[in-house]
Amino acid sequence: MARFVTIGYGDRDGYDRTDAAVRDEAHAHDARLLEGGAVVGVAGAPVQVRNHDGAGVTVESGSFMSAGLPVAGFGIIEAASLEEAVQLVSKTPCAVAQGVVEVWPLQEAP
């Protein structure tokens, strides 16, 4: 099985606009993913870390990248293919509650 990193983007307004029954099923879907071995978490406040040329570590509060919606959470899932991974995340809270989920194939480091 291949592994995929997922990044969910969404905000409270989109979540609140989504029918409660749809949200409840999305959370139940997340629970099934967890039971199946997925690693899923809500995003906390990020920091940026730099150590250019190994000359010293600097840390700044905040995200490096910006998006139209805030990062809501991350996951690592297993699926037989990218298509299966897409199907799995298409039923998660961010995907159904007016947000978006990115799916990144996780390639093992050499």
Image: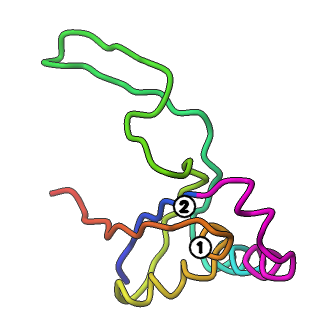
Q: Is mark 1 on a helix, strand or loop?
A: helix
Expressed as whole percent of the image width and height from the top left, the position of residue 43 reads: 60, 46
Residue 56 among those drawn in magenta: no
Whether residue 20 is situated above or below residue 84 in the rendered picture: above
Expressed as whole percent of the image width and height from the top left, the position of residue 2 reads: 35, 79
Q: Do the residues labelled 2 and 1 touch (CB within 8 Å)?
A: yes
**Looking at the rendering, which quadrant does residue 56 occupy?**
top left
Q: Name the residue under label 2.
A: 8
Q: What element carries label 2?
A: strand
What quarter of the picture does the N terminus occupy?
bottom left
Expressed as whole percent of the image width and height from the top left, the position of residue 18 reads: 77, 72
Residue 24 among those drawn in magenta: yes
Expressed as whole percent of the image width and height from the top left, the position of residue 69 reads: 54, 52
Residue 51 in the figure: left or right of residue 65: left
Disc 1 packing (10 Å; few <14; some 14–19; many ≥20): some
The residue that appears at 59% across and 54% down in the rendered structure is 73
Residue 21 in the figure: left or right of residue 44: right
Q: Alpha-carbon distance for marks 2 and 1?
A: 8 Å
Whether residue 46 is situated above or below residue 57 in the rendered picture: below
Q: Is the magenta stretch mostly helix, strand or loop?
A: helix
Q: Which mark is residue 31?
A: none
